Image (cartoon, grey):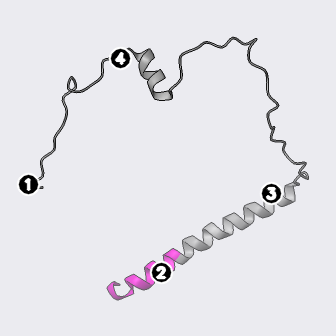
Amino acid sequence: MGAETRQCMSEDQDVPKQPPNEIATAKTGQQDSTISRSETKPTNMEVHHHPNVEKKYFKEYFLEFIMIFLAVTMGFFAAWIVLLIRLQPYI
């Protein structure tokens, strides 16, 4: 805020007038060429395979639910206790 001045170019000032085709080749440094499917050879690409994982039983899902439920519930009670302690002088 102050003595700084911004110098902005107008849209027409110092902008090279090139068709979009030439701009793309200027950025990549390559000539535009079309490659047919017959010219390209398929490459062997690496494929991500999922490991064989043991099936989870209902009991494991239930225990995970209980642990998450208890963690959230205990967090709620802890926040409530902190709030009660901080508001104790005002009650």
Alpha carbons under labels 1 and 4: distance apart:
37 Å
Residue 58 quadrant = bottom right
Is 83 within the magenta?
Answer: yes
Q: Does residue 28 appear to the left or right of 43 in the view shown?
A: left
Determine the secondary structure under disc 4. loop
The residue that label 3 is drawn on is: 61
> Which range of residues does the magenta coloring cover?
79-91
Instruction: For label 2, count other residues whose C-alpha is less than 10 Å away and answer few (under 14), some (14-19) or many (20+).
Output: few
Amino acid at pointer 1: Ala
Please name the residue shown 53% across and 18% down the image: 31
First in residue order: circle 2 vs circle 1:
1
Question: Which quadrant of the rendered structure holds the N terminus?
Answer: bottom left
Q: Which mark is residue 3?
A: 1
Please name the residue shown 67% across and 69% down the image: 70
Q: Does residue 18 appear to the left or right of 1 in the view shown?
A: right
Amino acid at pointer 3: Tyr
Amino acid at pointer 4: Gln
First in residue order: circle 3 vs circle 1:
1
Determine the secondary structure under disc 2. helix
Seen as rendered, the residue at the extreme bottom is: 89
Establish if 81 lies above or below 68.
below
The residue that label 4 is drawn on is: 18
First in residue order: circle 3 vs circle 2:
3
For marks 3 and 1, give the one nearer the viewer: 1
The residue that label 2 is drawn on is: 82
- Percent position (x, y) of residue 34? 61, 12
Q: Which mark is residue 28?
A: none
Please name the residue shown 76% across and 11% down the image: 38
Camera-side residue: 16 or 46? Answer: 16
Determine the secondary structure under disc 3. helix
- Percent position (x, y) of residue 8? 18, 37
Please name the residue shown 18% across and 29% down the image: 10
